[in-house]
Image (tube, helix red, strand yellow):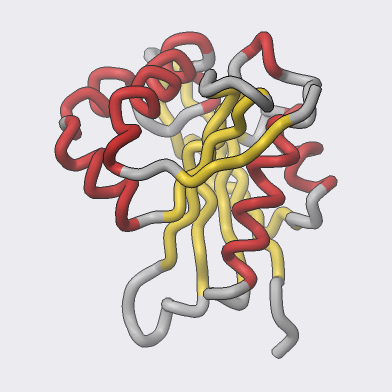
Amino acid sequence: MAIRVVRLTSADVERFRQVRVEGLRSDPIGFRYSEAEDAAVGTAVWAARLDLDFVVAALREGSDEILGVGGFSRLAGDKLSHKGLIWGMYVRAASRGTGASDAILEALIAHARLHVRQLQLTVIADNARARMFYERHGFVAYATEPDAVQQGDEYRDELSMWLRLAER
């Protein structure tokens, strides 16, 4: 399947939110935030974030159907602006294994190389599939926060990972 990656803007906020809500519903363990928390953010805030951050979608070539999404934001401040954060990675179940996730992350990394020295992300520690995906792209685990995310009566550890983009 041929895939193209496009940057999303505020004009795409409804399509983006539709995919994000699908991810929050179908894979609640994979996200740090709940669907209710995400809904409380509001469309205007998400629209502004799409224009501020670098958020991309993988599309099937010749179609506007979003297969998956992912975002990059640069940390703020004099002492942190050399770091970026990968956030909101989600690929629809029917599109997994098509290369969409690789295309999204590769686009985010390529963009980040122009702006930061290192990338960070977090993943639920027992999500072996996601861990292996990020490791395949060069991310290395550097810390585990025990009981970082509460989901109902369960607590999940969160793994912090990073990727160096530039030598010191």
Residue furthest out toward the right: 136
Which residue ends up furthest to the front in the rendered image? 62
Farthest residue in the bottom direction?
Answer: 168
Residue 112 picture location, percent across and down: 58, 65
Give the residue drawn at x 66%, y 46%: 105
User: Which residue appears at 75% of the width and 57% of the height?
Assistant: 140
Q: Is residue 126 left or right of residue 89?
A: right
Left or right placement of residue 104 versus residue 71 in this view: right
Q: How many marks?
A: 0
Side of 80 relative to 47 (left or right): right
Tell me what residue is drawn at x 84 percent, y 46 percent: 136
Position of residue 89 relative to residue 23, above or below, is below
Q: Position of residue 120 (x, y in %)?
A: 57, 59
Give the vertical position of 61 relative to 145 (above or below).
above
Where in the figure is residue 4, as x and y percent of width and height?
66, 37
In the rendered view of the protein, which quadrant contains the N terminus? top right
Residue 143 in sight here: no
Q: Nearer the viewer, residue 34 or 144?
A: 34
Q: Quadrant of the C terminus?
A: bottom right
Left or right: residue 32 compared with residue 104: left
Q: Nearer the viewer, residue 24 or 148?
A: 24
Compared to 44, does 83 lie above or below?
below
Residue 84 is situated, as x and y percent measured from the top left of the image, at 51, 65
Q: Residue at point 61% right, 33% down?
A: 58
